[in-house]
Image (tube, grey):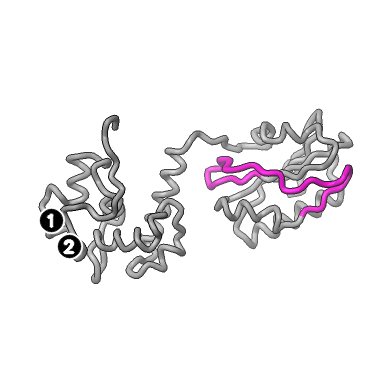
């Protein structure tokens, strides 16, 4: 809200470690405080406590929240389930809750991203390579909602060939935490036929993606005048 100050310190001033929510006055309990004063009035630890819902036998939910924030050095937004599970007292259910909440927030609060429904939707990202005289291999990283996270040129090859290795293609999508990728390259010759090499590369990428858990949605061949979807052509 306009004019509100967002509090980010992990320890709110009214409680100390080893304090249970039940020990706090009703006005200072995270849920009640959120309802009465709004989410901006809560510290990071209090917001996380609301999300977790409960602590464990050893720690109350507030202390567990502080422990999580300290263990992650405040980098909660990009925390993985694996990192959270390394925090003592965090089980699978709570780790999944936190990761899911962070991802949901990114999807709905970040700038609107392009959603890839079909091959046509990817073409704006490929305009720059359609007239190139060398082959350019491009990879789009997508999240679980098929939104484009990033678009990168992986390799630039010779006039009529381009050697592409799966490790180069998937390196950045792994960092992006992509759920899938869409690949594309241009044919400077202008032909919209898939070569044996194109088919072989596509199948290598699909196989590698299955191992990594990153699906290959499509592989497009583009020219000045058109495009070919390897998926629609039956090669995927």
Decide which of tag 1 and tag 2 comes sooner along the chain: 2
Instruction: Give left or right: position of 79 versus 29.
Output: right
- Identify whether 138 is placed above or below 169: above
Within the magenta stretch, is there residue 148?
yes
Q: How many marks?
A: 2
Q: Secondary structure at mark 1?
A: loop
- x and y percentages locating residue 214 in the rendered image: 61, 54
Numbered tag placed on residue 19 in the rendering: 2
Determine the image quadrant of residue 227.
Answer: top right
Q: Nearer the viewer, residue 208 or 48?
A: 48
Task: Where is residue 3? Give x, y as percent.
Answer: 27, 31
Task: Give yes or no for contact between labels 1 and 2 (Cβ–Cβ under 8 Å).
Answer: yes
Q: Which residues are magenta?
A: 140-164
Residue at position x 81%, y 32% from top?
131
> How far separated are the C-alphas under marks 1 and 2?
8 Å
Seen at 39% across and 49% down, the residue is 101
Residue 145, placed above or below residue 120: below
Mark 1 crowdedness (10 Å alpha carbons): few <14, some 14-19, many ≥20: few
Q: Position of residue 14 (x, y in %)?
A: 16, 53
What residue is pinned by disc 1? Answer: 24
């Amino acid at each position: 809200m306009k004019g509100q100050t967002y509090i980010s310190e992990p320890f709110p001033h009214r409680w100390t470690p080893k304090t249970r929510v039940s020990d706090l006055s009703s006005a200072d309990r995270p849920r009640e405080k959120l309802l009465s004063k709004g989410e901006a009035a809560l510290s990071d630890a209090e917001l996380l406590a609301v999300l977790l819902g409960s602590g464990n036998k050893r720690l109350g939910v507030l202390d567990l929240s502080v422990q999580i924030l300290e263990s992650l050095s405040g980098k909660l937004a990009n925390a993985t389930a694996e990192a959270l599970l390394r925090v003592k007292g965090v089980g699978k259910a709570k780790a999944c809750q936190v990761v899911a909440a962070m991802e949901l927030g990114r999807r709905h609060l970040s700038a609107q991203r392009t959603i890839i429904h079909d091959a046509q939707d990817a073409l704006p990202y490929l305009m720059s390579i359609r007239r190139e005289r060398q082959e350019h291999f491009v990879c789009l990283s997508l999240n679980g909602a098929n939104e484009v996270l990033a678009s990168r040129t992986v390799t630039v090859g010779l006039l009529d060939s381009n050697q592409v290795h799966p490790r180069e293609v998937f390196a950045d999508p792994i960092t992006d935490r992509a759920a899938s990728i869409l690949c594309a390259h241009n044919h400077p010759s202008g032909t919209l036929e898939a070569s044996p090499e194109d088919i072989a590369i596509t199948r290598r990428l699909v196989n590698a993606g299955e191992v990594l858990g990153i699906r290959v949605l499509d592989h497009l061949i583009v020219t000045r005048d058109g495009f070919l979807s390897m998926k629609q052509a039956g090669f995927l």
